[in-house]
Amino acid sequence: MSSHREFSCPSRREFLRAASLGCLGALFAGLGAGLAGCDTVEERTSDSESGITIEGNTIRLDLTKPDARPLAVAGGFLFIRQARTIALNLDGSRIRAFTSVCPHAGCDVSQFQGGQLICPCHGSRFNTSGQVLQGPAAQPLREYGVSRSGDLVTIRLS
Ligand code: FES
């Protein structure tokens, strides 16, 4: 009987999911406390199974699916790296979306803590309307149009 185990390379999805399990574990263990301690929730794939689909200038989110689920609750935050877009759930029902491109020097505004959107490069902070709270950024984040029908959210990148 052989004692070795066969190794197969993980898919990109498996790898990225494993890399983020600590963060997501906290999220799903207790959404309120999890969100407070988990300031960056990244989109990892772009397919209907994950709940995030990017087609042209449109992002579609299915909040019942794993990768979009963090946005289903009040205070929820999603950083969709592939589309350089961030989305917030303000109060359980209202969702806003913005470009993640920081107007200061183009880093991604990828963190959400204490009700503020934060650019990790030089510390610019924005409120949930995308307005500058703290520089060096001098311009607000560009907002995208969002429509919602139940658990399905559409973001128009224009
Ligand atoms: Fe965001 Fe400088 S690029 S603060």
Image: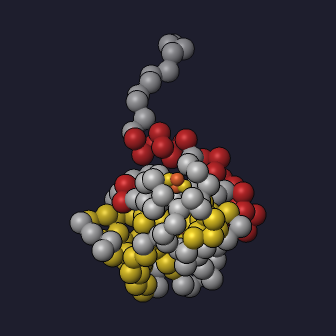
Which quarter of the rendered picture does the C terminus lie within?
bottom left
Name of the residue lying farthest toward the right:
33
Name of the residue lying farthest toward the left:
56
Q: Quadrant of residue 53?
A: bottom left
Q: Is residue 146 left or right of residue 35?
A: left
Q: Is residue 43 left or right of residue 120?
A: left
Rendered position, 29 above or below 72: above
User: Residue at the spot x=64%, y=77% of the render?
Assistant: 74
Report x, y in % for residue 55: 26, 65
Report x, y in % for residue 126: 59, 69
Report x, y in % for residue 44: 44, 52
User: Residue at the spot x=32%, y=72% of the render?
Assistant: 157
Rendered position, 11 above or below 107: above
Q: Is residue 39 left or right of residue 48?
A: right
Q: Is residue 67 visible?
A: no
Report x, y in % for residue 99: 42, 66
Q: Is residue 137 visible?
A: yes
Rendered position, 97 above or below 30: below
Q: Is residue 132 left or right of residue 26?
A: left
Marks counted in the figure total: 0
User: Residue at the spot x=53%, y=62% of the render?
Assistant: 137
User: Residue at the spot x=63%, y=70% of the render?
Assistant: 133
Q: Nearer the viewer, residue 109 or 131?
A: 131
Q: Quadrant of residue 10?
A: top left
For the rendered model, the colour scheme is: secondary structure
